[in-house]
Amino acid sequence: MYKILAKTLFIGKNLVFLPSCHSTNDIAQELLSEGTLEGTVIITENQTNGRGQRGSGWESEPGKNLTFSLVLKPTFLSVQQQFELNRVVSLAVCDFLNTFSTGFQVKWPNDIYYHDRKICGILIQNSIRQGRIESSIVGIGLNINQQIFKEQKPISLSRVTGEFVPLPEALEALAQHIETRYLTLKAGNRERLHKDYLHKLYRFGEEYLYRANGELFNGRITDVSPEGKLEVESKKGIQQFDFKEVEFII
Amino acid sequence: MKTKEIRDLIDFISKSGLNEVNIETEELKLSVKRDAEVQTKFVESAPVVSQTPAVSAPTQAPTTPATEASESSKPQEPSNNYLEVKSPMIGTFYRSANPDSPPFVAVGDKIEQGQPVCIIEAMKLFNEIESEVSGTIVKVMVENASPVEFDQVLFLVDPS
């Protein structure tokens, strides 16, 4: 059902469709070891062992959502600059969703939320050779047409707009947005990405409740550092947090 | 600072993999530097601790303890004969791709240059680190799921 993407420059020119597979990121890794090209997309209808970050799964009803992986070779980035990949991909997903409706934002570091509900998860796996990024597998799970979720929290695009969205068209449009953002990064315009990322950042600049070191506190997100740390201003002054060091109270 | 506290601190530093630590407060100035000899000693004692198979080994065929013995005699050589696999970044060190999958490498495994040896995660980005050296893993220097610094030694590898 998915065809080679026509409107992009390099993403999806090689497209692998699998009716069912355990994890598109794992398939991407296998293809990479065989030397697959940048832009290769592996997409499935039914991901049986979809993964979020270490150990957490990803729930998706077969045939309803986009679950795919994209192979990139951002060899122009140093290992220290890899947070840019989170910026590029999460911004692109936001750009895509914002063509349907407002209200989509990036929850630091790389989840996409519609108000307080998650609509998209991103899992990026890099391969580091000789201290350089050799390749990058971007796994995306984006809820499109699923209506009912086991848990209350997640939401889908169709639940927001009330309309069915054909998946192949959604993939093509999303791929174009990823490509645009990726090429902005490749061209070296990191300042633009940084600015747009803050602009789209969930809870940026306003006071909300957070938890760090087991303690609740009111804070205001002021920035995200080049390496991706979240800067939160509170009574204690401005603190920088690593992922897992701070929890959003939603 | 009490003697015990200093001892604990040195103990902590020795386990940390750091080569040099300087601490200065109002009441004391402490400088700990690891030299090659100390490191050799450290390497010598550690594989027994990290290698859980040692628990099951004695009940098995007598060949296993023999390998064990030859392995523990090796670290008598100066540690600079070993190659190091270092962390290219700050992050969290994981020995396996997923919590339910086996470690990439274990002590005694032969590895080739370019073989993935661990994952380092930073800001939800998962980095599979390929070894830059070939040889036999002599020691895993970092505990699973613990933080690592840039250039920190992750594995010691015997190239011979």
Image (cartoon, rainbow, N blue to C red):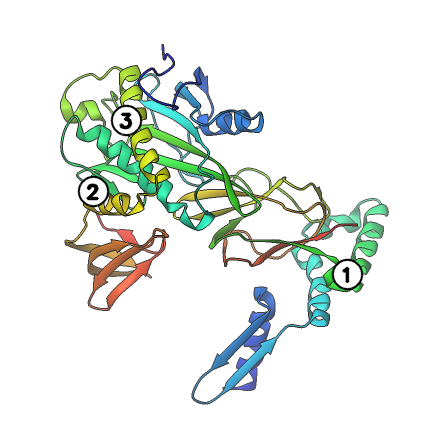
Residue A172 percent coordinates (x, y): 30, 20
Residue A46 sits in quarter: top left
Q: How many marks?
A: 3
Q: CA distance from mark 1 to mark 2?
A: 54 Å
Determine the CA span between mark 3 and mark 1. Answer: 54 Å
With respect to residue A212, does B121 lie above or below? above
For the residue marked with disc 2, what is the amino acid? Lys
Which residue is under mark 1? B75
Mark 2 surroundings within 10 Å by alpha-carbon count, few (fewer than 14), some (14 through 19), many (20 or more): some
Residue hosting label 3: A143
Question: What is the crowding at mark 1: few (fewer than 14 residues within 10 Å), some, or many (at least 20)?
Answer: many
Q: On what subunit does the disc labeled 1 rest? A: B
Q: Which residue is the extreme one toward the front?
A: A187
- Mark whose residue sits in front, 1 or 2: 2
A211 lies left or right of A135? left
Marks 1/2 same chain:
no
Q: Earlier in the sequence, mark 2 or mark 3?
A: 3
Task: Identify the residue position indicated by label 2 in the image.
Answer: A200
What distance separates the C-alpha of mark 2 from that of mark 3?
19 Å
Taking the spot 16% from the left edge, 26% from the top edge, the residue there is A100
> Marks 1 and 2: CB-CB under 8 Å?
no
**At 23% from the left edge and 34% from the top edge, which residue is drawn?**
A94
Q: Nearer the viewer, residue A31 or A162?
A: A31
- Considering every residue shown, the one lying at the far top of the view is A1
Q: Dots 3 and 1: beta carbons under 8 Å?
A: no
